[in-house]
Image: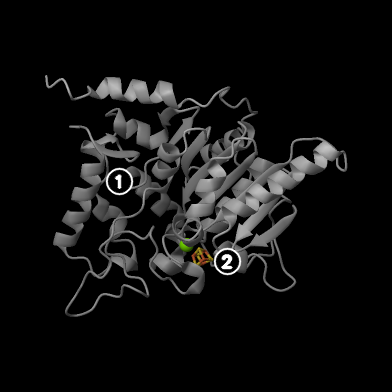
Amino acid sequence: MNASIIPHARLHVTAAISMVPTSCKPASVTLIEQVNVRTINYTAGHRTCQGCESAQIMKLMAKAAGPRTIVLGATGCMYVANTSYYATPWGVPWMHTQLGSAGSGALGVAAALRAQMRKGTMKDEPINVIAFCGDGGGADMGLNAISTTMTHPDYNLLILLYDNETYANTDIQVSGSSPWGANTSFSTPGKVKRIMHHRWKKNVAGLMLAGHPTCKYVGTISTSYPLQAMNNIRKALSIGGPTFIHCLNPCPKGWDFDPVLSFELGELAVNTGIWPLYEVECCKLTLYGKTEAIAKGRMKRLPVRDYLLKQGRFAHFTDEDIAFFQSKVDEMWEKWLVPGVIPLHKEI
Ligand code: SF4
Ligand code: MG
């Protein structure tokens, strides 16, 4: 063995030990046992598209967090469609924050609550602070503010990135989170050039967990697995410090599919291995649900073709394009240090 090469297993253990935030204990929470998404915290009154899974995660999030919660919404679909003139579904205090400000907005609110409780001008009690942002606001424009917020361990807050894989609110422009080759209003396939979007989707949750060693909770969720999603949100809100959750949300308008398929597409994203489900709590990584079954060999990944061809945004794909997409997902599962999480190749 070449002495300069760190064995794979040792690299993993060393990283885990050195990164554990001081005084991090896994969250102790009452887990939700049934999905009953009726809640007065997020109710009728929004104007999102039929089959919108981004609205679904808002509802699950509001239910999981409960009434002692303040929500901040960065500009995006869930701001615009949720607060149209004189209509809102929010039953908890809610405020708009600018497109790139989910991180700084949440940090400011958490700091203000802390200051008021310290001065005795309000009761000292746990209040959840959640800022949500879309992929435009979280994976692109607001990444800086979220990253800075993740380095402030003294403030309790959750950033929830709902990812519909485009700037959907302003007419489906490509974002850093859009999948390779997708047809968006900035990457429309033409006769001469079929594939106009050549970048691979940004790994935002991986970025958060690898880059912010004092952050106690980072996770990925899907609205097609709602019970797990709600419980992950509860854990993130209870563990202390700034936390981050990335949720994939099928979007009938932007992805161009029949709204009845929303739930199925969320499942297919997981079952094809495109969207791995995991959580990192006190630096302990757990793959969960179907992702764990795939990783442990109990289940075979479905071909990406099953997912791609149900969506109009990939209707221009040839067999060659699908094969390329499949090869990239295979690479993620076969070559990455941790499938779907850490993109370092195992050989190093
Ligand atoms: Fe939801 Fe997509 Fe419609 Fe936005 S464009 S409201 S994310 S379905
Ligand atoms: Mg978006």
The residue lying toward the viewer, choosing from 233 and 313, is: 233
Does the numbered disc 2 mark a residue whose Cβ is under 8 Å from ligand 1?
Answer: yes
Q: Residue placed at 18% from the left, 24% from the top?
A: 4
Q: Quadrant of the N terminus?
A: top left
Outermost residue on the left side: it is: 1
Camera-nearest residue between 46 and 237 = 237
Residue 318: name its quadrant.
Answer: bottom left
Q: Residue 251: x, y in percent?
A: 45, 62
Decide if residue 169 is in sight here.
yes
Q: Nearer the viewer, residue 38 or 5?
A: 5
Mark positioned earlier in the residue sequence (1 or 2): 2
Secondary structure found at label 1: loop
Q: Name the amino acid, label 2.
A: Thr
Q: CA distance from mark 1 to mark 2?
A: 27 Å
**Residue 19 higher or lower than 41, as above or below:** above
Q: Is residue 252 left or right of residue 100?
A: left
Residue 117 x/y as whole percent: 81, 39
Mark 2: secondary structure: loop
Q: Residue at x 54, y 53 (%)?
A: 145
- Image quadrant holding the C terminus, namely top left
Residue 24 to residue 51: above or below: above
Q: Position of residue 270 (x, y in %)?
A: 37, 44
Residue 48 is tagged as 2
Q: Residue visible at 36% across and 49% down?
A: 269
Q: Quadrant for residue 323, please give it.
A: bottom left
- In the picture of the structure, the residue carrying the numbered disc 1 is 272
For residue 275, above or below residue 137: above
Q: Along the horizontal axis of the image, is 154 left or right of 212?
A: right
Residue 132: image tag: none
Q: Is residue 253 above or below residue 31?
A: below
Amino acid marked by disc 1: Thr
Left or right: where 217 falls relative to 92: left
